[in-house]
Image (cartoon, helix red, strand yellow):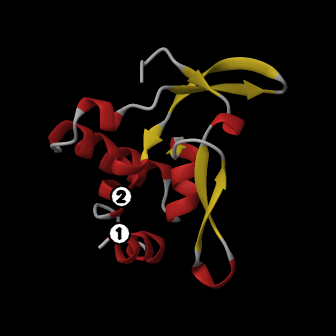
Amino acid sequence: MNVNHHQAKRDRSYFEWGDKMQIVRKGNGDIAMTETELVDFFGVTWRKLYYRLQLLLKTSHLHPDERDAGEEEVFVNGRPKGYAPLYLLSTIIALSFQLDSTEALSVQKVHL
């Protein structure tokens, strides 16, 4: 996808936690999540996620098409304020191996 491609949450899928720590896929389309959604999903601080994500994107062997899923428009008080990058499933899985949390371990178990 093109970096300038903008998506709405209704045009993509994302993960949430269901009952009994089960991963639940929500939405339609390819899986892509914002940094805020990843912080909530993995149960880590934004600082920790951002550091690991930047390290992963700089040092990994992910194909450029696997790293970028476009952007989602961000609204504050109903007004557009910018765009948040979206990360694809391959990046989410790779990121789970960089984070130390129960949630990250659960993602690893599903994808091993």
In the displayed image of the protein, which residue is found farthest to the top? Answer: 4
Placement of the N terminus among the 4 image quadrants: top left
Q: Which residue is mark 2?
A: 93
Sequence-earlier tag: 1 or 2: 2
> Mark on residue 19?
none
The image shows residue 31, relative to residue 78, as above or below, that is: below
Q: Is residue 55 left or right of residue 76?
A: left
Picture quadrant of residue 25: bottom right
* Residue 47 in picture, x, y percent from top left: 43, 49
The residue under label 2 is which amino acid type? Ile
Q: Quadrant of residue 101?
A: bottom left
> From mark 1 to mark 2, how far is it between C-alphas?
7 Å
The reply to whether callout 1 and callout 2 are in contact (CB within 8 Å) is yes
Number of the front mark, 1 or 2: 1
Say which mark, if any, is on residue 111. 1
Dot 2 lies on which element? helix
Q: Position of residue 39 (x, y in %)?
A: 53, 54
Q: Residue furthest bottom?
A: 20
Q: Residue at x 36, y 58 (%)?
A: 93
Kind of element beneath mark 1: helix
